[in-house]
């Protein structure tokens, strides 16, 4: 896994475990009251109807509940590791490491193919300079976003673990509900919800896989889509300048969607059986709607910059580029919408 696993949070989780254990011990009293009340009700029904089968079922369920309760939190944390960290490691999908790679690759990209644009016979090519600075700005924006999202994903992993601790602390009440026919569905849903929390990293991993695909094939995909109009000289110039901006906007929006929406999409799939892929697509469409404003702004910036570069120079175009990139936040704001 990534370097984030080297951060030692044991001091915090040791204290949290002690607090949750005390809470669980206290709530176990309520669980035993529910078990005893259920036993009395079933004995009464058995005496009235002559059927003692319900009594034996109650005793069996109660025995399982009492046996499970001391190990519930430990088993849930083990499930979180098996269904989260270990699963992502086996699949080769680690959101944290992938974000580190994104930031590194984007940060170094402008310098992999050469430094500043060449100056031939002392004449500066404004379009070449503008394209270079557009790529440079996009690269460092993505590097900065990768650092921010690294922190956000790390916090997301900690929130997942805290949710499991707190959920396990309250579990005795819902374990006690399993002994009553009227409350059994509520108890089952609660414990399925706990399992769903354990699957959060899978959602992040799936989302980051798609982000990786965008990174790997994004430029070629953009070229293929716009190739029919790419033969026009001015359009080709605009697209050459605009492609890095479009790629940065798409990746940023999708990573934000993955961070905030993936846990809900996966949890809903576990608890209701909804389709994970459609949940991601729906969330992506919501983000794309918001991103349309950013993309439209980028198109206008690139068009104006191309016209400016062929005349007075690239200085004005660079200033307009900063304005276009600033629209990313407005487009990304819709990425946290409920995909349903």
Image (cartoon, helix red, strand yellow):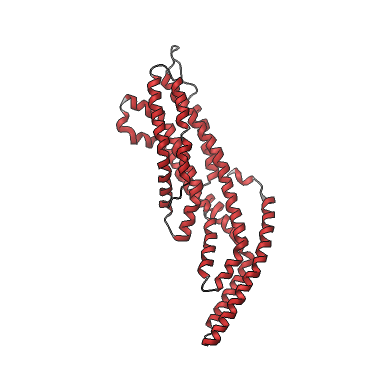
**Residue 337: percent from left, percent from top:** 46, 47
Could you say which is closer to the camera, residue 111 or residue 258? 258
Q: Is residue 34 left or right of residue 226?
A: right
**Residue 50: percent from left, percent from top:** 52, 88
Q: Is residue 318 left or right of residue 80?
A: left
Count of numbered marks: 0
Question: Considering only vertical position in the picture, is 232 above or below 14?
Answer: above
Residue at 46% in and 44% down: 335
**Residue 63: percent from left, percent from top:** 60, 74
**Residue 93: percent from left, percent from top:** 51, 47
Question: Considering only vertical position in the picture, is 182 above or below 205?
Answer: below
Quarter holding residue 291? top left
Could you say which is closer to the camera, residue 55 or residue 289? 289
Residue at 30% in and 31% down: 229
Q: Is residue 36 left or right of residue 50?
A: right
Outermost residue, top side: 121
Could you say which is closer to the camera, residue 30 or residue 68? 30
**Residue 215 in view in this figure:** no
**Residue 312 in view in this figure:** yes
């Amino acid at each position: 896994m990534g370097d984030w696993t080297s951060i030692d949070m044991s001091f915090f989780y040791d204290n949290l475990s002690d607090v949750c254990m005390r809470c669980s011990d206290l709530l176990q009293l309520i669980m035993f009251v529910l078990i005893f009340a259920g036993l009395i009700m079933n004995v009464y029904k058995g005496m009235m109807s002559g059927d003692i089968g319900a009594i034996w079922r109650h005793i069996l369920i109660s025995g399982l509940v009492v046996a499970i309760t001391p190990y519930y939190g430990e088993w849930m944390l083990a499930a979180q590791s098996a269904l989260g960290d270990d699963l992502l490691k086996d699949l080769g999908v680690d959101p944290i490491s992938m974000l580190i790679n994104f930031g590194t690759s984007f940060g170094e990209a402008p310098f992999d193919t050469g430094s500043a644009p060449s100056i031939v016979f002392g004449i500066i090519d404004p379009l070449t300079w503008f394209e270079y600075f557009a790529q440079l700005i996009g690269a460092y924006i993505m590097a900065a976003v990768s650092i921010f999202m690294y922190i956000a994903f790390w916090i997301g992993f900690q929130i997942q673990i805290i949710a499991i601790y707190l959920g396990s602390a309250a579990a005795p009440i819902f374990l006690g509900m399993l002994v009553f026919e009227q409350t059994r569905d509520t108890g089952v849903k609660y414990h399925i919800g706990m399992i769903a929390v354990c699957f959060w990293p899978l959602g992040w991993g799936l989302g980051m896989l798609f982000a990786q695909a965008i990174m790997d094939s994004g430029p070629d995909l953009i070229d293929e889509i716009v190739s029919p109009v790419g033969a026009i000289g001015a359009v080709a110039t605009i697209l050459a300048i605009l492609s890095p901006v479009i790629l940065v906007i798409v990746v940023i929006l999708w990573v934000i969607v993955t961070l905030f929406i993936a846990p809900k999409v996966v949890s809903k799939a576990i608890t209701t059986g909804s389709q994970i892929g459609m949940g991601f697509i729906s969330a992506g469409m919501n983000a794309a709607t918001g991103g349309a404003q950013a993309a439209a702004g980028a198109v206008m910036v690139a068009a104006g910059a191309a016209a400016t570069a062929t005349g007075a120079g690239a200085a004005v175009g660079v200033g307009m580029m900063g304005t276009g990139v600033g629209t990313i936040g407005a487009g990304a704001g819709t990425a946290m919408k409920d995909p349903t």
